[in-house]
Amino acid sequence: MSRTERIEDEIRSFHSPFLSVGIAGLIACAIGFAFSPQQFFRSYLFAYLFWMSVGLGCLPILMMYHLVGGAWGYSIRRLLESGTRTIVLLSVLFIPVLVGMREIYRWVNPSTAEVGEAVLKKTLYLNVPFFIARAVFFFFLWWFFANRLNRWSAAQDETGDLGLLRRFARLSGPGLTFYGFTLTFALIDWAMSLEPRWYSTVYGMLWMVDTALSGLAFAIVVFTFLSDRSPLSEVARPEHLHDLGNLLFAFLMLWAYLSFSQLIIMWAGNIPEEIDWYLSRLRHGWEWTAAALISFQFFVPWFLLLSRRNKRDRRRLGYIALLVLAMRIVDTFWMVTPAFYPDGFTLHWLDPIALAGIGGVWLAMYARELLAMPLLAVNDPNTVPHKAI
């Protein structure tokens, strides 16, 4: 048995455990729904937004690679493409959010005059039919770009047609623009509207960086885990790892810049409609979550990625990316859950269960998609190694 066959068998061996965990988690969520429908939908939204950011976040990194090229992207190209092919599953997993809109979003049934007044000003946008129509449009557009890129990628394997490189670039340029536009409005709908009085012009950009950071960190974790076996071992060179580490470092810096910019602008403005969002996330126990994010989603990985040695070592880079990915869970929890519990830190047992349920199903499909195409693109011109940094 070849090493390539062994890596395929190893990937295949993860499918059933992931699927089992996912099904068990979703069954447990169904039990939780029977006792507390409102909490189920709240926990489900948090878990969904994290896994959505991982799967959907593969798309902008893939399009960026098709625009700029480079051996760094070749090494994780198929890992990213596999993530983009889960968008159909993500669209199906979004259905419970639509079903539970009345339990999740206060603007559907305003409970106070203050919220009702805020919703009344935005009723042309914040209404259930338009919310659903926008979601359908967003998923269709994301699927369209992902489907085209994957179809052309398969054609490139078969034909080696270099003309496809121009198609990749021509689609990816507008694709990144549409991705940023649609993701901004999607997260305004799905997350920012949890507090309909609050608004931020930085929020969409912050989520763009969040999703890209999640997708990149996940791809690095998978790549470093599988890179001691063929065929990924052929491209797991120090210079490639260094490039991936630098890109992860850049996204961490951008995340920190946007997060701090939003905070300092709103804090200085001290407008009640804006500052309340931070007050509910920096008091009553939530401040420790914020401190953990500052420490472990920025300072610790930032400091570790300053080291050339850490970026060029497969295992060390993988652990750093895993830390970033784990903290992305905390970040999503901190951005979403205080909207429901502003008066005190709350971690319900359904939160990790929903995370495991959705994650298990998503990872099972991801493992299956990894086997759908060769782990390295056959006729990609970026296979030519570049000089070490």
Image: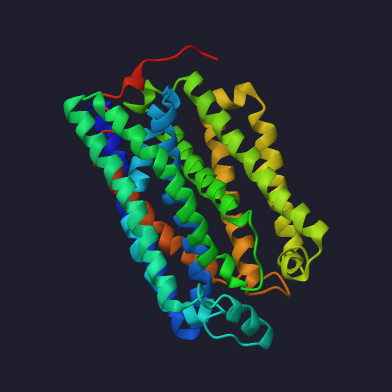
Left or right position of 296 against 373: right
Residue 325 lies, in percent from the top left, at 54, 47
Give me the residue at 27% from left, 37% from top. 8
Q: Decide: is 100 above or below 213.
A: below
Q: Decide: is 17 above or below 129.
A: above
Query: Residue 383 appears in which quarter of the rendering?
Result: top left
User: Is residue 141 or residue 310 the one in the foreground?
Assistant: 141
Q: Decide: is 138 above or below 119.
A: above
Give me the residue at 55% from left, 39% from top. 321
Left or right position of 182 against 164: right
User: Is residue 248 or residue 27 the one in the foreground?
Assistant: 248
Residue 37 lies, in percent from the top left, at 48, 82
Query: Residue 110 appears in which quarter of the rendering?
Result: bottom right
Give me the residue at 63% from left, 56% from top. 201
Residue 263 lies, in percent from the top left, at 74, 55
User: Is residue 5 or residue 97 the one in the foreground?
Assistant: 97
